[in-house]
Image (spheres, rainbow, N blue to C red):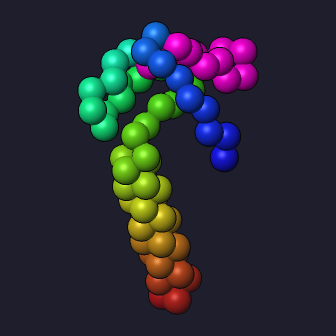
Amino acid sequence: MLALSRKKNDALIINNNIEITVLEIKGEQVKLGISAPKEIPIYRKEVYIQIQEANKEAMNAQALEALSGLLK
């Protein structure tokens, strides 16, 4: 992991097309602005984990359905 110190209005560039800017700092909270192409999905980590878990559950359900279809 790369750890960087940034101040308000400082930015980072990732892969030439993603810019992350520190918009505001209040106590322990930092507000970030992210500029990226529309085809690049951006999620908060907790939402991303929920999506991944839902996808795994859906794949397991499809696999069980396919197996039960073979056994009939």
Total marks in image: 0
Residue sitting nearer the eye, 68 or 64:
64
Residue at figure coordinates x 41%, y 23% from the top left: 32
Residue 49, given in percent of the width and then of the height, sits at 43, 55
Residue at figure coordinates x 67%, y 23% from the top left: 14
Residue at figure coordinates x 61%, y 19% from the top left: 12
Vertical order, 28 against 32 (above or below):
below
Start-end of magenta stretch: 10-22
In this image, 59 relative to 17: left or right? left
Taking the image as drawn, is residue 69 in sight?
Answer: no
Residue at figure coordinates x 52%, y 73% from the top left: 63
Residue 64, given in percent of the width and then of the height, sits at 47, 78
Taking the image as drawn, is residue 45 in sight?
Answer: yes
Q: Quadrant of residue 13?
A: top right
Residue sitting nearer the eye, 67 or 18:
18
The residue lying furthest to the top in this view is: 9
Vertical order, 67 against 29 (above or below):
below
Q: Residue 14 lies in magenta, yes or no?
A: yes
Dominant secondary-structure state across the stretch colored magenta: strand
Residue 50, given in percent of the width and then of the height, sits at 37, 55
Vertical order, 55 against 43 (above or below):
below
The residue lying furthest to the left in this view is: 26
Q: Residue 52 lies in magenta, yes or no?
A: no
